[in-house]
Image (spheres, grey):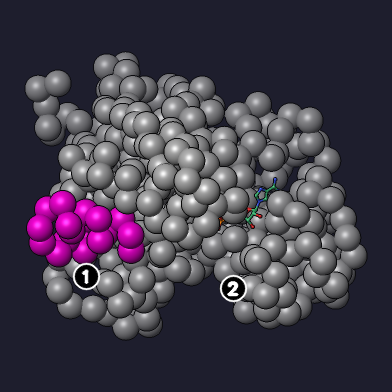
Amino acid sequence: MFDAVLARLDKAAQIFGLAPDIAEILRHPKKEVAVSLPIKMDDGSTKVFEGYRTVHSTHLGPSKGGIRYAMDVNADEVRALSAWMTFKCAIANLPYGGAKGGIKCDPRKMSVGELERLTRAYTRSLSDIFGVNKDIPAPDMGTGKREMAWLLDEFNRIVGEDSPGVVTGKPITLGGSKGREVATGRGVMISTLAAMKKMGINYKAATAAVQGFGNVGSHAARLLASQKIKVVAISDHTAAFHNENGIDLDKAFKYAASNGNILKGFDGGQLINNNELLTASVDVLVPAAIQGVITAANANDIKAKLIVEGANGPTEADADAILNEKGIIVVPDVLANGGGVTVSYFEWVQNKYGHYWSEDEVNMKHDASMNQAFENVWFNAQQFKTSMRIGAYITALKRLDKAIRYKGNY
Ligand code: NAD
């Protein structure tokens, strides 16, 4: 995965004309930590879990990035995700560098008690990395506000004071921000509307397919539907569904909530598979589940005119050229899913300020920030006659280049 990051970084650096020494700095993460976490399981046995935290860059400010719980977590994946956070924060014009963390585990197969002990052990092991002005984690795949609350509580015990700004994506009662939970999905919706406007697509007559029905996918689907975009296909890791009249998303939400957060068995559409969802005849495709689903093998079959990447890294580097050749506009992950970290930044600001905003205020600031980021990326893509993905990297490189040079002395 990190090779996919470097492929895009190198291409953008070359088109932008980035000095080789600056590019070289960005090609390497600043700090990588791997930890072993022995956990007492409910059956009395001890299991040792692998945990990671990579700080890719602190050139623009403290590092920021989520924590992922999944079986495929490894050092390379975390490194790639940490670099994407550097570019994402730079594109969203936030005063943050990039980081990412993860634990190799299957949270669906663990009890709440085991997950709590694991999260607390991870926090203890990384307490010297995390800090309000050092490195600020957040949720990602397999984690949410519950894990962030445990992380905050453990960190507070270690430092002996309340430090709500050390983590974002917290429950609102513990200093979380209104609007944070749906923010990534909201950013996907704002990016979709902005791209459709540029492309001359009437979104009220448009159709969409959304892969993934977790935090990002479910809210993205619901918010697209709230704009009258007809969501005709949804999926998760257990099943995919198509309904040409539009999926009843309230029904899908209720069904998933009462069915262990999975869609299997939902009766609101015809059963299809995930590849059929990716290649469905729709205007916009939103991959919002996992990485590497759009590949050189299926890119030719994609019929959507627009792809808005809710997930991180859903398109493999060798599929980029095929999509470009087909004239498909791709709003890249580093722009499209930046709504989450944008509202995480608002949460951190509110924690520092000790004063909290209304949901309308958060949404208004979020939408303005996403639209501005979209315009900047669009402008750079046009100016450098390149794709939105490379335009997004160039947008980030412009800020990072300045910051690295101002700080100097490297
Ligand atoms: P999540 O754990 O809440 O949901 C993931 C969803 O993907 C689930 O519905 C799961 O069933 C589905 N899924 C897993 N494997 C699949 C497969 N093979 N095919 C189809 N569906 C599959 O995770 P999330 O927070 O929604 O994150 C999804 C993606 O968005 C990840 O790439 C993550 O890094 C990225 N992201 C998340 C946030 C955030 O704020 N949560 C922010 C930016 C980017």
Q: Nearer the viewer, residue 247 or 256?
A: 256
Q: Which SS type dominates the magenta stretch?
A: helix
Query: 231 left or right of 137?
Result: right
Image coordinates for residue 226, horizontal then vertical, percent: 62, 79
Q: Residue at x 18, y 58 (%)?
A: 156
Q: Is residue 265 above or below residue 26?
A: below
Query: Do residues under tags 2 and 1 come within 8 Å of each other at their CB atoms?
Result: no
Which tag is nearer the camera, tag 2 or tag 1?
1
Q: Residue at x 54, y 52 (%)?
A: 110
Q: Amino acid at mark 1?
A: Gln
Q: Is mark 2 within 8 Å of ligand 1?
A: no
Answer with the quarter of the image where residue 153 lies: bottom left
Q: Is residue 299 above or below residue 8?
A: below
- Give the residues in magenta: 149-167
Q: Which residue is mark 1?
A: 350
Image coordinates for residue 42, horizontal then vertical, percent: 49, 51
Q: Which residue is mark 2?
A: 223
Label 1 CA crowd tier, 10 Å (few <14, some 14–19, many 20+): some
Q: Amino acid at mark 2?
A: Leu
Q: In the rendered image, is residue 142 in sight?
A: no
The mark nearer the N terminus, 2 or 1, is: 2
Q: Residue furthest front?
A: 44
Image coordinates for residue 407, horizontal then vertical, percent: 12, 32
Image coordinates for residue 312, horizontal then vertical, percent: 53, 44
Query: 26 left or right of 77?
Result: left
Q: Quadrant of the C terminus?
A: top left
* Residue 409, disc: none
Q: Based on the picture, tell me whether residue 159 belongs to the magenta stretch.
A: yes
Q: Secondary structure at mark 1?
A: helix
